Image (cartoon, coloured by chain):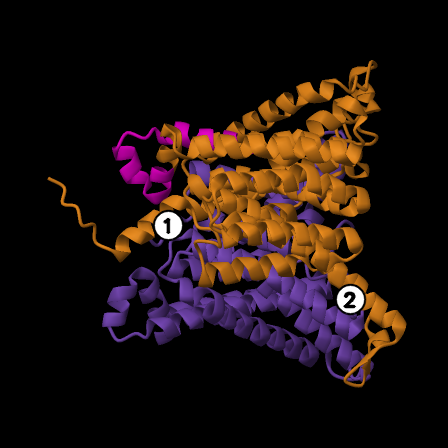
Amino acid sequence: MIRAVAAMAAVALSVTLVDLFPRSILVFLAFQLSLLYVYVTRIPAWLRTGLLGVALLVLMPLIGLRNGYYLEVATQVGIFAALALGLNIVVGLAGLLDLGYVAFFAVGAYSWAIVGSPHANLIFGGGFPLAPGWFYVFLFVGLAVAAITGVLLGLPVMRLRGDYLAIVTLGFGEVIRVLANNLDKPINLTNGPKGITPIGRPPLPFGIPYSEGFYFLVLLIVAVVILVNRRLEDSHIGRAWEAMREDELAAQAMGVPLVRAKLLAFACGASFAGVMGVVFSAKQIFINPESFTFLESIGVLAMVILGGMGSIPGAVVGATVVTVLNLQVLKGFSLWLNELKNAGVTVLGYSLADLPTQLEPAKYERMVFGIILVLMMIFRPQGIFPARRRQRELAHTDKVPTAVVP
Amino acid sequence: MDYELLIGIFPQVLLDGILLGFMYALIALGYTMVYGVLEFINFAHSEIFIFGAFVGVEILLSLQSAGWLARMPWVVVLILVILAGMLASGLLAVTIERVAYRPLRTAPRLIPLISAIGVSFFLQDVIRLFESMWRNAFNLVYPTMDVMNIRFELTSTLDVSVRSLVVIVAALLMLWSLHVLVNRTKIGTAIRAVAEDQAAASLMGINVNRIISLTFLIGGAMGGAAGVLFGIQYSLINPYTGFIPGLKAFTAAVLGGIGNIPGAMLGGLVLGLLEAFAASYMSLLTGGAFGAEYKDIFAFSVLILILIFRPKGLLGEVVRGRA
């Protein structure tokens, strides 16, 4: 009872604070923390679902009206959550370390970008861009194209194990990026480093503004992805993946068709990235190969690792924490430092105005990812929200089962 | 097609390929030696390599600002810089092993690999942070020594600069001394023993942890030397420069047969030559449709093909067969 009241109070209080101080980063962080508290605290399931639903469906868009940037952050979190959930299937469930995951995201993004902008006229003659309504069709086209790419990548690397697979997928990711960078000749397919713009945006019902529209769209996709993930986890194929992760030989001996299971893992993981790629390209209006670097792949990996490999809530929480760290904490720190610099503050006799101009704390994403990866591997390889099955396994080692199997 | 041009540039391309090949060979040694003893891809090796380049550039820049660069004999400067780069990178490699890999030695294979990726990213930004604070710039240019730019014209189409000769001679010296160290000394025997079978080696009275540290030290030092030579040859470096050469050097190590030291040298040379020829001839042969910008793809395709068709590499004999 007390917990239920505390959860409701936390959400209400943080929303009020956001309303009072719409520019403060700390206050928005408090709102996010209150949602996390609602998720982890022990309250009745209906209350938890209700609170989270109200917060995500009603409060968040309202906050977006007060400060549009927060809605942008929330949308980005959603996009990365879907990516993390996709990678979670490949890395977490099937145990295949994919270091080029962002390539599938790129494939999805380019599939809509090319036909959703006038750029396709250069390739096919005329008749483009397609009507904005086609966007919804292309959500599925992006899914299919990415899944096929996943299978195409999977086929040659099937025989590789562990670390070799990681390096080859890394190489594959780079190949896709280099192709995107250079396929402006002989046929101008991707327009090279200049990128493609303007990319068409989908028509939205009820005249919802675009930022809110994309937020709801991303939220819907994430919900579907979570649902699919949960169904997959306990399905036949999900168990096959986990068996494969633990011991390939044993799994094969138990009748798991390794080739099919691996290809399915790649295809499933890739398809989520493909869908989000389509959304991403429409949301950004402009894409170029810079959005699909190795850095992004490792960013998504860091989200999965932070949350816990194989864990669905883990992937979502990981995506939130990492995205917020990058978009808000690093940027906020940068802005704060600049303010201090301009105000001429001195720390321990050192004038901050003398700080080098090249220091831009906002650019240190790699350091954040690096620290997350190393610390998690050393101190908590199961992540902050370990997968349920792993939790059960650990619980078993603690206490000997009392019931005797006849 | 312009056959005269095709043949004309051949010697120069060959030279470029050899230079690049030696660079890859030196870096590949670090990957292959570590893989030999631990069966683990030291993903941070590309940063260990570029760290050597940064130590080198810092020393050269401070010598320059002190006005000593022009006054000291260039050979002394060169040896000093290379040794400093080797020492720094070697120690960095040992530190990384102690902090980020040793606690994970018994963990499943992917765990230390992920940790290594983390170390790699972390180091890139640490170098950037340091250089931004110290010089307010992280794209640094190697100061030139005038001697380096002297060129000898061998034929009308081929000239060799002192710079290139230095790189080749230094790389050869390094590879030769490593060969002697591994094959002719007691330490080398110990390294090979640990690579063969850790448990048996420790029963023979070899301190396995010490040998693993030593392997990282030697591999790191080779990487550091490669870093300095890279800086001397290509002059422009930044904290992220190391990544692609590192990846290609890994390809070279796999190409030669990972865990196999002569293999890494051979793989480096082969990959360097392949890449140089691909970069110069692809554009000519396809009429400009595909040019040098695809050379990275080319290297990765080699990696994928090798892993699929001959996972044990050119020289075969993986330490413990696993691909």
Residue at x 71%, y 65% (from the top left corner): B128
Coordinates of residue A362 in the picture (x, y in percent): 74, 59
Q: Which residue occupies 59% across, 35% down? A: A222
Q: Which label's residue is closer to the chain start, 2 or 1?
A: 2
- Is residue A264 highlighted in magenta? yes
Label 2 chain ID: A
Q: Colour of chain A?
A: orange
Q: Secondary structure at mark 2?
A: loop
Which residue corresponds to the image point at 43% horizontal and 51% vertical from the top-left?
A: B110
Give neighbour class at mark 2: few <14, some 14-19, many 20+ (Cα, 10 Å).
Answer: some
Vertical relation: B151 (above or below) A256: below
The magenta-colored residue range is: A242-270
> B108 and B127: which one is in front?
B108
Where's residue A83, x and y in %?
59, 39
- Secondary structure beneath dot 1 equals helix
- Disc 2: which residue: A359
For the residues labelled 2 and 1, the Cα–Cα distance comes to 42 Å
Quarter of the picture holding the N terminus of chain B:
top right
Magenta-drawn stretch, dominant element (helix, strand or loop)? helix
**In the orientation shown, which residue stands out farthest toward the front?**
A1
Looking at the rendered structure, the kind of residue marked 1 is Gln
Q: Nearer the viewer, residue A153 or B217?
A: A153
- The tag on residue A391 is 1
Disc 1 chain ID: A
Chain assigned purple = B
